[in-house]
Image (spheres, rainbow, N blue to C red):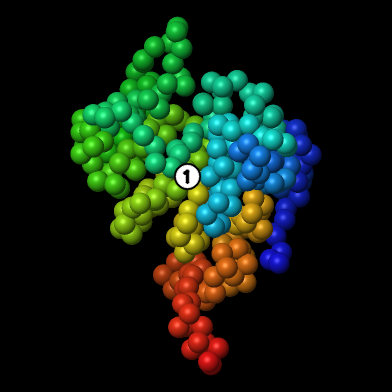
Amino acid sequence: MTETTRTPVAPAGAAPEDALPGRPAVRLSARGLTLSYGDRTVVRELDLDVEDGTVTAVIGPNGCGKSTLLRAFGRLMKPTAGTVLLDGRPIHTVPTREVAERVGLLPQSPAAPEGLSVADLVARGRHPHQTWYRRWSSDDEAAVEQALRATGTFDLAERTLDELSGGQRQRAWIAMALAQETELLLLDEPTNHLDLAHQIEVLDLVRELHLTTGRTVVVVLHDLSLAARYADRLVAMKDGRVVAQGAPTEVLTEELVQEVFGLRARVRVDEETGAPLVVPLSRHDFKATDGV
């Protein structure tokens, strides 16, 4: 069993300013979190802190609870037990508008009405800031333009989503999330169904946005090498629980890949980035390696 990297945990309900000495600031966390779909439990008694000002990548096999955890962090799913804390407050006690102003969630395979333009999509990110007494303003206009420019979609603003490539569509959806102007950004498999070039394009964008705005990002990724390359921290999940967490060089080991994914692999150091690089082994490699 891989030993989980642990940091001191503040008591449930403690505000960030009450965090233990030397512990990184945390705005979003889970305590004893259990999540279920009917009688099927997907996440079990999970404790996790999302460190402020980091890109955290959640990795694990299909069905381990990664996307379900993100839904709970975005208050789209109510826990069976335990709680999600936002600034030390149970997130389900925080007003919906306040959550939407603080936490942005981009789900897997988001859907939009046919014929919707990029500009109209990104403008939807401003909905949490609208009320009956506060309509569209110059601040909203500026936020949309800034999001379009930051994601390289300004020149695509009048085109419909149907006209865009996969990478362009993902950038448009990320622009919508940016226009929401939240401190925390949750991205569920933003590289899903993209070819390698577009995966790099989207992850470069996520990293640049983090570096330029200081946003805290939690992203679910399947590609282990890309997760290690772009994230400050990795959280490895299996069977609804956190198995290991910490810096990529601490978490991504050959033993962990075998334990979590049931995959024999070699973990090397990427000469370009210094990040761990996972090289899967096939059955033929097993024979060569084992001398059979």
Residue 252 horizontal side relative to residue 160, left or right: right
Residue 98 horizontal side relative to residue 138, left or right: right
Task: Give the residue at x 58% y 72%.
Answer: 254
Q: Position of residue 102 (x, y in %)?
A: 54, 29
Mark 1 is surrounded, within 10 Å at the Cα level, by few (under 14), some (14 to 19) or many (20 or more) other residues, namely many
Indicate the quadrant where residue 10 lies.
top right
> For the residue labelled by badge 1, is the local secondary structure a helix, a strand or a loop?
strand
Direction front: furthest residue: 39
Direction right: furthest residue: 11
Residue 128 horizontal side relative to residue 51, left or right: left
Going by the numbered disc 1, the residue's amino acid type is: Asp
Indicate the quadrant where residue 157 lies.
top left
Instruction: Name the residue tied to disc 1.
Output: 188
Given residues 21 and 15, the one toward you in this image is 15
Indicate the quadrant where residue 155 lies.
top left
> Which quadrant of the figure contains the N terminus?
bottom right
Image vertical order of residue 249 relative to residue 80, above or below? below
Q: Position of residue 5 (x, y in %)?
A: 69, 59
Task: Give the residue at x 46% y 77%.
Answer: 282
Task: Give the residue at x 31% y 57%.
Answer: 195
Given residues 252 and 264, the one toward you in this image is 264
Q: Position of residue 198 (x, y in %)?
A: 31, 53
